[in-house]
Each structure stands twice: as structure tokens, then as C-alpha cells.
Image (cartoon, grey):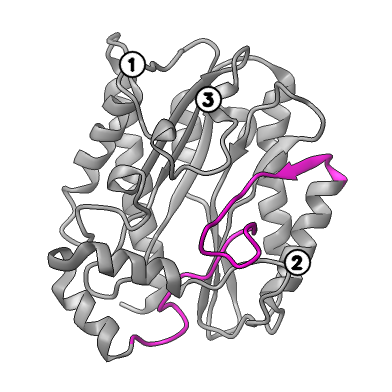
Amino acid sequence: MDKLETCRQTRKIASDSLYKALAKLLKSKKPISEVILRDAWISEMQKSKDIFPEGWYDPPPHGIIILFATDNNTKRLNFKSARPEEVWPRDDIFLDRKKGIALLYSSPVDKKSGIIGDFEMTLYFGKNKIIKNQLKTNLDIIKKIFEEAKKDMRLSDICLIGSKLLKQNKFVNIVYSVTDPTSTNLGHTVPFSYEDMNAKERKLLKLGGKNWKEFRVMISKKRKFVNTIESLTFKAPIAVTIEPRSKIKNKKDSPLVAFHGIILFKENGEKELLTNFDKIFKLVGMTYMS
């Protein structure tokens, strides 16, 4: 399997697993806490023998973000970073099925190649038209960035395109990264999608879960960011995440919403945007997003 196909399949595992976990939980009338959904998602993903049992983005535990809020109390979603413990999934915060907002992220890693297939989306169970429009616009911005992305563009060029689109829609990007030298960005490369591992990296991959902390730190530091200074260009094959986390500018009660797409630039000159959202949108009644 080539590197881009591995990225596609790894992300699909995360998406399919979330769909299965959500479908089972929503069918029941029992309350769904952040921890319950996290554990159900992990359980589904761990059925795959192709990925490591834990995600690379840790903390939060297991490399998974689950945050619940409501359209009349968005405080839980107004976070700068998902690293601090107060933002980790909790067992005393429950999904509101009538006005709830859920931000969901996982970070699976392919066992054979070390290629990641990050997946993130925001679900909304309410009727607030402003929030619905914010969600749709955020996803549309990702699609427009994809349309404008071209071979040989620098990552900083992509950042400029995305920043202009956010500004045009009166959005601000709320992303903070301890690894990015500029602290904020619109995404990053998928390590090893465009370059081979060196001997040390191959050794860490072979050790896998036996030295998991060092391995996931290696993945984190290997990324190149879609920021204002990165000169790396789109040279096929390469996979790059596009993941703005947006709020409406000067609107205090605006929730932070996020979707995570991956652009694949193929050696035959074609490009593709991975989303994997539609089945889950349909499951929760977000038909306005498709």
C-alpha cells in the first residue's frame, strides 16, 4: 500500500469507528458522557490490527479529544489548547441531544509505516441558525483552501489563503501549538508521507508500543506546519492537514468549531481532499452540511 493510501485508510478507521460508536450510543437512551464516548471510540478503533492501540497526540490521554457544550453555554469549547488536564474528557459532562455541541478528535497511527490519519469534526444537535452557518462556513473554508492549493506552493502560501478566507468570513483561528515556532497554524504535514524514515525512526517504529512516548514525540516534532514562515512546498506525494479551529470574531458566545481535512497530492498530478464526514452528519441529522 502506498503512503497516501495508508493515510486514507488510517483516517477511515477513525471515521468508521466513530460512526459505529455513536450509532450504538445514540440508539440507547442512556446518558452519554465525554468519557463514555471516548472509551467507545477507542474500543472500536482497537478492533483494527492495522493501527496502534493509542493515538499519537497525547496528552490528552489516548490521543483523543472529546468536548461537549451546548448552544447556550459554549464555555467548554472555548479552549486554547487540548493539552491541559481541565480539557481532557470528563465523566460528569454529558451530551445534550437537543442543543448539544460536540468537538471530537482522534490521532490514529498506522503500525507498518508510522503514518498518521488524524480525524476531527464538530457535531451539533440543536437548531441555532448562526451556529449551523458557522459550522458550514468552517468546512467550506477547508474546501476552498483545497481548491486553491497547487503543486509547488509553499505551506506559508496555503496559510495566507486560509487566513484571508477566515478574515472574509469574520472568523478568527484559535489554534495554539507548542511545537510550531509561530505558535499558531492552519494544519501540518503528515510525517513520512513525503519522506522516508531514517534509521533511528525505523527503530522506534519497530519498537512501537514498547517505547510509545518517544515514538509519538518523534511524530509530533517531525511535522512541518501550515504557518506564515514555512517554506516547504507541495511536492508529490505528500499529505497535509487543513484544520482551522474557528470562532466568530467579537462574538463572545460563539463556540469554537473545528473540522479536519487532509489534502493528498498524488504523483500523477491529481489531488484529493479527505473528509469522511457525510455518514456521521447523516447519523446525527446534520443534513445541511452535505
Task: Please determine whether, in this image, residue 154 is positioned above or below residue 121.
Answer: below
Q: Could you tell whether 221 is left or right of 129 in the image?
A: left
Cβ atoms at labels 1 and 2 below 8 Å apart: no
Between the C-alphas of marks 2 and 3, the distance is 33 Å
Cβ atoms at labels 1 and 3 below 8 Å apart: no
List the single residue furthest toward the right. Answer: 168
Q: Could you tell whether 264 is left or right of 33 in the image?
A: right
Boundaries of the magenta span: 168-197
- Find out whether residue 190 is within the magenta segment: yes
Q: Residue 73 placed where, x, y %?
A: 59, 15
The image quadrant where one finds the C terminus is top right
Q: Nearer the viewer, residue 5 or 228?
A: 228
The image quadrant where one finds the N terminus is bottom left
Between the C-alphas of marks 1 and 3, the distance is 13 Å
* Residue under pointer 1: 92
Q: Earlier in the sequence, mark 1 or mark 3?
A: 3
Please give the count of numbered marks on the rendered protein. 3
* Residue under pointer 2: 148
Q: Is residue 6 visible?
A: no
Mark 3: secondary structure: helix
